[in-house]
Amino acid sequence: MRAIKALVCALALAACGDDGGSDAGNNGQVGDELAGYCIATFTADYDLLSPFDEVALHAEEGQRYLLTGLPDSPALVYQHPDGAFDLELDVATAPIDAPCLAEGAVLTSEYVAFAELAVYSDQALQNLVCTIEKFTRGSAMGFGYGYVADNVYEILPQGGFCDGLESGYVRATRITIGDMGHVGVPVFDLFQLQE
C-alpha cells in the first residue's frame, strides 16, 4: 500500500535553464549511486512544464531520470546536490523508454533521502534525535510529511528511518536552479522492476 504524500510547498518562479545551474551540468539526471531504480530515458528532446505552463525542464534525447509516483502518478525526480524535487510526467506524450511503466510490470519500492536531514523532536528544532544521511534508504511502509511553519516540516517516517522513529521535524531543503526554486522534504519513493 502506497503512503499518501502530504502537499509539498513548492514555488516555481519561472523557467529554468538547460544547464541545470549548480548541479555540475548533469541537468538533474540519475547518478551512479542510485543505479538499479526505475528510470525514464528520453528518446527525443522534450519540455516538461511547470504548473504555470513554463518550461521547468528541457530534457534532451538520451537523458535519464529516476521515476517516482508509480504506477498511478508518474513523475521524474530531478536530482540536485542539495536535494531533489519531482516533476509531473505525461507518459502519454513524453518520448521515453521506461520498462517500469510497461503494463503488468511488477515493482518493489523503498524511500530514499536525497539530502542529509537533521531530525528533531520539536518544532523549534532544538532537540536533535537523529540524522538521515543522504541516500539512506528506508522501508516502503510509507513516509509522509506536512508543512508546519517557518520552513519546518513535520515528518512521519513510519518507522523506516532513524531506528523506528514515528515522527519528527526537519528544516525544509531549498533548491534553486536558474529562475526556478523549490522548497520541501527531498524523500521520494523509488521503484525497482522485479525480474
Image (spheres, rainbow, N blue to C red):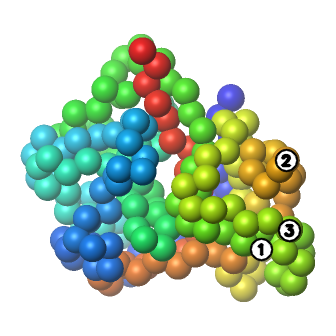
Task: Name which residue type carries label 1.
Answer: Val
| In the foreground, 82 or 136 | 136
Q: Is residue 161 visible?
A: yes
Camera-side mark, 1 or 2:
2
Q: CA distance from mark 2 to mark 3?
A: 12 Å
Residue 129 disc label: 3
User: How many residues crowd mark 2 within 10 Å: few (<14), some (14–19), many (20+)?
Assistant: few
Q: Residue at x 75, y 45 (%)?
A: 160
Asked whether, in this view, residue 108 is left or right of residue 170, the answer is: left
The image quadrant where one finds the C terminus is top left
Q: Secondary structure at mark 1?
A: strand
Residue 123 showing in the rendered view: no
Closer to us: 88 or 111: 111
Q: CA distance from mark 1 to mark 3?
A: 18 Å
Element type at mark 3: strand
In primary-sequence order, the first of circles 1 and 3 is 3
**Residue 139 x/y as whole percent:** 69, 39
Q: Quadrant of residue 156?
A: bottom right
Residue 185 versus residue 5 in the image, above or below: below
Residue at image mark 1: 148
At which x and y percent is residue 130? Answer: 80, 65
Locate the N terminus and report the quarter of the image it occupies.
top right
Residue 100 vertical placement versus 137 (above, below):
above
Residue at x 79%, y 55% (from the top left corner): 162
Residue 29, label in figure: none
Tag 2 or tag 1, which sits nearer the N-term? 1
Q: Residue at x 67, y 44 (%)?
A: 138
Would you name the residue on which mark 2 appears? Answer: 164
The CA distance from mark 1 to mark 2 is 22 Å
